[in-house]
Amino acid sequence: MESANKGSFFLDEIGEVSLSIQVKLLGVLKEKEILRLGATEAIPFDLRIIAASNRNLSNLVNDKVFRKDLYYRLNVIPIHLPALRDRKEDIPDLVEFFINKYNSKHKKDFIKSVELETMRYFENYQWPGNVRELENVIERAVVLETGESIQKANLPDKIFGAIPKLQIPSMNKEAIDLERTLDQIENKMLSNALIQC
């Protein structure tokens, strides 16, 4: 907080902080000063506090695991950020950003894009870990990739469950019932669309 003076201070996953730390944090935010360990003089600060949580803080307050006074002190301008699965249009831009970031980190500036089929998997996956999960998948792919575009071979197996494989009956002695087969395909596609929505 001392280093961030006159700037912004980000508290990530504030909903996971213990009650004892919440009390200390509340005191710091009320007094707008900190006391270094072993020091006798408080150091004033002027900060913009940004707190994030993937849990509903008002529910935590009702459950008495998050202090009400700290909640109201932090909840000045709430911003709800939808899950990545609810804003799939952001995925291509995020993928490009993370490719550039990890190209630079791993000194692999030859990776320029994502294979079209790979992007399809990204857009159909539910991303339970949100942007952090996408970032980890991209870093892994950048590390493993040897070509100019990220291939699906460098994705974790869990991503492949995103697009169902259609079961097309093989040609054999029995005649294929086209209408029945099309009905099965349509039912499978509708079922998967409902699951994703």
Image (cartoon, rainbow, N blue to C red):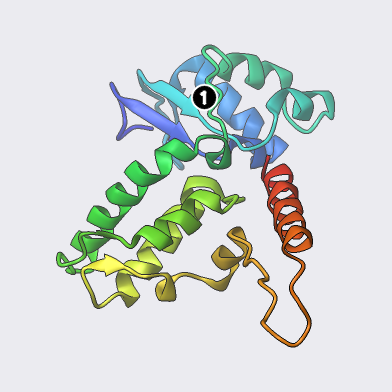
> Residue 35: image x %, image y %?
45, 31
> Residue 99: image x %, image y %?
28, 57
Q: Which image quadrant: the N terminus?
A: top left
Report the number of discs. 1
Q: Nearer the viewer, residue 77 or 150?
A: 150
Of all residues, the one furthest to the right in this rendering is 63
Where 70 falls versus 88 (above or below)? Answer: above
Q: Is residue 39 left or right of residue 93?
A: right
> Residue 159: image x %, image y %?
55, 64
Where 3 falls versus 99 (above or below)? Answer: above
- Secondary element at image label 1: helix
Disc 1 residue type (three-letter): Val
Q: Nearer the viewer, residue 165 or 11?
A: 165
> Residue 78: image x %, image y %?
55, 17
Of all residues, the one furthest to the bottom in this rendering is 173
Q: Is residue 58 left or right of residue 63?
A: left
Q: Nearer the viewer, residue 85 or 61?
A: 85
Where 133 falls versus 12 (above or below)? Answer: below
Q: Residue shown at 59%/23% (left/top)? A: 26
Q: Residue shown at 54%/32% (left/top)? A: 52
Q: Is residue 127 left or right of residue 1?
A: right
Q: Residue shown at 50%/35% (left/top)? A: 87
Q: Residue shown at 46%/70% (left/top)? A: 155
Residue denoted by label 1: 28
Q: Which image quadrant: the C terminus?
A: top right
Q: Neighbour class for label 1 at 10 Å: few (<14), some, many (≥20)?
A: some
Instruction: Tell me where residue 138 sits by quadrant.
Output: bottom left
